[in-house]
Amino acid sequence: SGKSYSRQYIRSLTSQIQIRLVEIDLGEYRDEEITPRDIGITIGLALGSPLPEFDLKTSRWTINFLNWFGYQVESLRGQIWIVFDGFGDATPPRSVYESVDNLTRRIGQERLPQVRCVLIDFEERLPREIEPVVEYHQTPQIEAMDIAQFFLEQNLGIQPERISELTAR
């Protein structure tokens, strides 16, 4: 699917230019409820820094985590990309959307130039105050006919029937 190609592309790109990548696939939590703490643990592990014990109340936990994250980012060299995927594959609780809002707000307002947050299959609007630093990209779904048409236009000498057969897989 286009989403999996997007993640493969991001993985390839970040490895080639040595960007630290944090991948959070909400689809992995289909049968369980994901919490902001789960997201924080994933980010902490990817940064190589275990999380300290924070207050378990979600709102305070998120604030404490974001403060900790800001200090961690300052001490690291290089860029960090945090990629969220699977919003359409799972039904995350409202607290996860609020955590994403808070994370993107922190990245945008504090101008953490070394951090990028990529949201795949995210249908909600982000906080208005960070709009100046947000880029939205809508990528249309690629169908087998699009792939077949691409190969036909490349004039590779492959018979149209064979292209149709290959793209049908």
Image: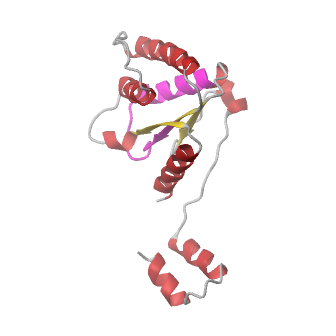
Q: Which quadrant of the figure contains the C terminus?
A: bottom left
Position of 58 relative to 156 (above/below) = above
Residue at the spot x=60%, y=88% of the render? Answer: 157
Q: Which residues are magenta?
A: 82-107
Residue 93 position, x and y percent, is 38, 31
Image coloring type? secondary structure
- Residue 117 in view (yes/no): yes
How many numbered dots are placed on residues in this image? 0
Depth check: 131 or 24 in front?
Answer: 24
- Residue 124 in view (yes/no): no
Q: Is residue 169 magenta?
A: no
Position of 15 relative to 163 (above/below) = above
Q: Is residue 104 magenta?
A: yes
Residue at the spot x=45%, y=83% of the render? Answer: 165
Residue 110 position, x and y percent, is 65, 18
Q: Quadrant of residue 113?
A: top right
